[in-house]
Structure formats: C-alpha cells, structure tokens
Amino acid sequence: MTHRRLMLIAALLGAATAYYSFDLGRYLSLDYFKSQQAVIETWRAAQPAKAALLFFLAYVAVTGLSLPGAAAMTLAGGAVFGLLWGVVLVSFASTAGATLAFLAARFLLRDWVQQRFGERLRAINEGIAREGGFYLFTLRLVPVFPFFVINLLMGLTAIRTLTFYWVSQVGMLLGTIVYVNAGTQLAQIESLSGILSPALVGSFALLGVFPLIAKKFTEHLQMKKVYAGWTKPRRFDRNLVVIGGGSAGLVTAYIAAAVKAKVTLVEKHQLGGDCLNTGCVPSKALIRSAKLLSHLRRSREFGIREARAGFDFAEVMERVQSVIKTVAPHDSAQRYTELGVDVVEGTAKIVSPWEVEITRTGGTTQRLTTRAIVIAAGARPFVPPIPGIAEAGYLTSDTVWNLRQLPRRLVVLGGGPIGSELTQAFARLGAQVTQVEMAPRILLREDPDVSELVAQRFRAEGIAVLVDHKAKQFTVENGEKILIAEHEGRDVRIPFDGLLVAVGRVANLAGYGLEELGIATGRTVDVNEFLQTSFPNIYAAGDVAGPYQFTHTAAHQAWYAAVNALFDPFKKFRADYAVIPWATFVDPEAARVGLNEIEAKERAIPYEATVYGIDDLDRAIADGEAHGFVKVLTVPGKDKILGVTIVGEHAGDLIAEYVLAMRQGIGLNKILGTIHIYPTMAEANKYAAGAWKKAHAPQRLLQWVQRFHAWRRG
C-alpha cells in the first residue's frame, strides 16, 4: 500500500510539475480559447466524436489533478459544443474528475488524518455518515466555495464514494448550465468575473441556503407529527422539571437555578441518589476501614514486629453511615432550595410532553406544566433469574449496607468493579470470600495484565477467585446454602452463608410515563447526541441514558441536558464523550482514560504501548507499595496520547494528569518537561513519559553527538 501511495504521489507531482514547467495553463485561459475559437470549432465540425472525447478526457484530467482552468474549459465547452452537449460533457467530466480527486485524497491522506485526529473528528465523521450528502449538496450549490477544495476535503471524511458522485453530479448541474450557457456567448465575455454578477452570486447563495431552510421545515413537520394529539399549553409553570435527585438530576437542577430558570426537582427516595446513599460514598468508606486492617496485618513489612486491631463489624458499618450523614448536606434539599430549586419529595410521572404529575410523599398530587423535562431516574442492581436465588436470599449493592453481622462465608457473584471492590473489602474485614465470575477473568473491561495483577492480589489475601464459573442454581440442603456453578462442563458446589449479587445495573424505566408516551427505550432511554428523547423537549441524563454508569459522567451529561433543555432551539450542544476516565478502587487501584489495548485492537487503531513499572518508583518503594504500572498508548512515532491505564497506589488520583493532557491535546513531551515533586507517586507519570522518550531517542543524531564529544576531547 505504501508503494502504491508513493507511485501515485510521484505521478501527481510529475503532472503538476509538467503543467507549471511548460506553462500548460496558458492553453486553459479564456484569452487563448477566444483567440483559437474559430480553429477549434472548425476541427470539432470535422471530427465531432474525437473532439468530444478529447475535451472530456482533458476536463477530467484538469479537475482530477485540481489544476486551474476548469472554469475556462466550461466556457469553451459551451462555445464549441453548444448548450446541450456542452452541459452533458462538462457535467459528467467534472463529476468524474472531482471523484478522482476525492479518491486520491482518500487514498493518500484519509488514514493518516483519521489516525492523527480521529477522536476529534468523531463527531464530524458521524455527522457526515448521517447527513453527508445533504451538506455536500449545499456546498455544490454555492460557487463561493472552490470545488477542488470540496473534492479534497470530502475525501478525508467517511462519506461513501457513490454518494459523493451522484450528489456532485446533481449539485453542480445548475452551476454547469450557467457557465456553459455563458460560453455560448464567448465572444461577448471579457473575463470570468463578468459571468457572476452580484445578483447571480446572490441567487446561488439562496440556492445553497434553501436546503437548510428545507431541513428546518422538515424538522418542523416531524415535530408536528411527534406532538400530534397533544395540546401545548400557552403558558408554563416551570422552565424545567427534573425527575430524579442523583448526580445527574442535582447538577441539572443546579445549572437551571444558576441561570435563573424556574426549576422543580422531584426525588422519591433520598437526594444524592445511589452515589451518596448506596454507591460511591459508602463503598469508599468501607474500603478505607478494610485497608487500614490490611496495613496492620502487613506491619512486619514496615518494621513493626506486631500490630493488632480489635474491631466490631457493626461499628465499621455504623461508621459508613456516619460518613454518608457527613456528606449528605452537600446534596440536601435545604441547600438546593437556598440555591433556588423547588425540591419536591415524591414520585413523578410524565402525562404529556409538557406536563408532569407529582404525587408527594403525603399523598397529595400536583400537575406542573413545563417547557422541558429531564429524566434522571438512575439505575438499580440487576438480579439474574437464577433458580433458587430468592429462596437462598441475597444482598445487592443497595442492601448490603444494612448488614451488621459479617457473613462467615460470603459468595460475591460478579467480577466487575462493584463486585471486585466489595469482594476485597469484605475479605479484609474477615469474611471467607469466594468471587464467582462467568467470564475468563475479572475486570473484563480492562486489559488482561490489569485483571491478572488484581486477581493475584486477591488470591494472596485469601480470596477464592473462580473465573469461567457460571452460576446455575442455588439450593438449601440441610440448612446450608449452596451455589451450583458450571465450570468446564462439570458442576462445582460452593457452600456459603451470605450472597452478594453484583452483576451489573439496569436503568429505572418503569413508572415515569415513558411507555404511555411512546418514548423509545432499550436497556436505557433512547437519546440522540443532544440527549433528547423522541420528544425533543424531553431529555435524559445519567445512568438512565447511558452509555456510562459513573457519577462523574452523569454530572457531565447534566450540563448538556440542562443547557439544551433551557436554550433549544436557540442553541444546543452535542454531548462530548471524547475523554472519559474511570477507576476501580480495589487494591491496587485500576484507573483508565481513553483507549486500552483491547479496544485499540478491536477498533484496528494503530498504537505504541509504553509501560513504566511502579516497582521502580522511589516513593512506592518507601511506602511499601512497589507494584503496578503506568501504561500509555500513543500514536505510532508520535507523543500524542490515545489512552492510559494505571494500576497501583492512588491510581485514581494519578490518572488526572493524563485526563487533562488528553483533553487539552498535551503530549508526552510536555509531561516529561513538567517538574514533578520528589518523592511522589505522581513521578510515575513523568517516568512513563521518559520511557517513551528513551524509546524514540534520535539514535543517528546521538552517534554524531558522540563523535562531536570525542573530537572535543582531542
């Protein structure tokens, strides 16, 4: 492929060199055609077929090579062949040449452009794939845009070749007719600029704007169809009603209040959602207590002969509740009321595109009319329908916080982030934990080396990690609970006292009026890039919308949902998922942003992987945490970061530097040139950049420098 590219580049350079070296452009000027018009017309009359073929091929060559002269040739076509045949020849020749230029740009440059700027161009690529023909047609109608530039730029996008061809054929037809018709009066034309009067340019511009107007009109008709049968209120009680008081709902309401909109936030249970009450906050509080115990058990590693801790599991769980209560005021009804949000405790149901019925906790009901609605109802733990699971009894990440007695033998069903975090925490608190995962490894979304490092630590701490084990049935035999799992075609019996189900979460879709309104849903609410549902004034954000189920992405989406809901149709923004980080708070922590090796290979994205082992880091050695690594994926030969995975102490904090770098387009060279305090864990980021730099050192230049220093020594 590289050989073919070089051959094509050489051919193009040769043609361009010949064109300018021999001043071939003088034969494509308006003056030349006018001076030779009689001779050319005589030759055409004598050999019409040959003249038409040569003109066609010459026109294709000029447009295919993006050389100047196409406009003059179009005029000549009208003068020599007349309006009908001139239009036919020029129309097909110009489209064929444009398609050749399009294909040349695609062959030579598209892969390079997409590799280098692929993430930034993702939204453009998606838009071109969806509406590329429409935008190309608009550009073809307006002669203000040089057609050769359009040909080349379109070649760098994902638009289909066939679409490019037929849209160009149709889109350039009007302009072709105007030029060819002008060419029939070639003797009266003094310059190319004389063809396009201001009135004619204005007419073309209006033609270009027409598709945009048509699109808006079509959207208007579609909206009328969507809202058919519903009566829109003349006035509204609220600018916005937000359903759900988790991360997405709270941030949406906060933004609305900050811009002085009248907003009502409805929450049926507890403000703060899963993150505060059953997710992030309680799990991290539990993990912190468990980690303290693990350090005490490792006391000899720190030169302390013996260290013990007496503790009561119930008191640990009470501390978890205390932490929740301490954080809760940040998400309290009082705080948001003071910010200007109308906070209502109750359930909400959308009864029309502009009406929400609220049933308050006391039983009273209220209907509010609103210009826009944001659904931020969150998600709940998924419990698989395994035979006997209800009879055996189970806990989820929602209910586990009610425990006050530690199960002696605990089975954790699931090897994802939630299951893995709670597996290690309960094991460190003294439970005999068996983690059961049907996939070949735990933490399946991470690279295999990450999974293996975490699994090794789990097993070293006494956890039974059973991968490739599919839960088939739960039974109770002689008062003992047993999980029957299938492994390599045979049944494995796993006795237990407590069961924690952590196999994923499902969006809360029922009870909000979605089905009654016909709002499309799957595993989540179906939304477009603006987070709009099938009703443009109804939005969804957070876990209920996907594609990520993280508190920070819910808050990120909330900004788009709030701004779009309040300011559409004047302005709206596409949700940007270009740089989304996350972390799993096991020990060692696993954090990631951008691509990992699995995703890069699945998407056939070329990359280089640079790995720095944290076991070599001074601070990690001093802290007794010399394990893990920083893995950076970059564009081959470049310092542009495609993704980063960090496994080790405080990985969730260390990843922030790379999140900023990717968001702001900062490469490894600048990270290497940034001073990091010694001794800190953050130096691992700099050393990873140093490892990349070492691998890309200019060896030939260094050889010359070596000779230079040898010469200076005499």
Image (cartoon, rainbow, N blue to C red):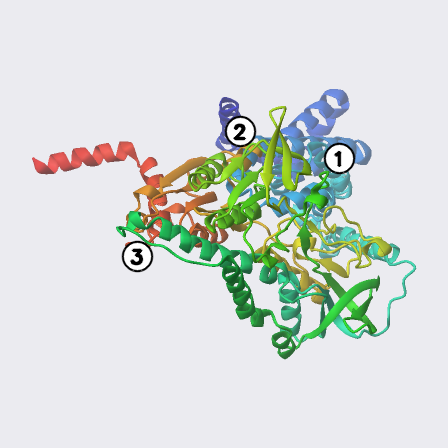
Q: Nearer the viewer, mark 3 or mark 2?
A: 3
Farthest residue, direction left: 714
Label 1 sits on a secondary structure element that is: helix
Q: Nearer the viewer, residue 477 or 410?
A: 477
Q: Amino acid at mark 3?
A: Ile
* Mark earlier in primary sequence (3, 2): 2
Task: Tell me: residue 675, above or below residue 121.
Answer: below
Q: Please state the horizontal and vertical placement of residue 453, each as a whole percent of the image.
A: 44, 38
Task: Tell me: residue 652, above or below residue 443.
Answer: below
Label 2 sits on a secondary structure element that is: helix
Residue identified by numbered label 3: 677
Residue identified by numbered label 2: 12
Seen at 80% across and 69% down, the residue is: 358
Q: Amino acid at mark 1?
A: Trp
Q: Alpha-carbon distance for marks 3 and 1?
A: 60 Å
Locate residue 693 relative to residue 532 in the image: left or right.
left
Q: Amino acid at mark 2?
A: Leu
Seen at 90% across and 58% down, the residue is: 228
* Mark earlier in primary sequence (3, 1): 1
Q: Alpha-carbon distance for marks 2 and 1?
A: 25 Å
> Does residue 274 appear anywhere in the picture?
yes
Residue identified by numbered label 1: 166
Q: Please state the horizontal and vertical placement of residue 6, each as a whole percent of the image.
A: 49, 25
Label pair 3/1, CB-CB below 8 angstroms = no
Q: Please state the horizontal and vertical placement of residue 116, each as a whole percent of the image.
A: 50, 41
Q: Nearer the viewer, residue 378 or 161?
A: 378
Task: Tell me: residue 628, above or below residue 214.
Answer: above
Seen at 63% across and 70% down, the residue is: 254
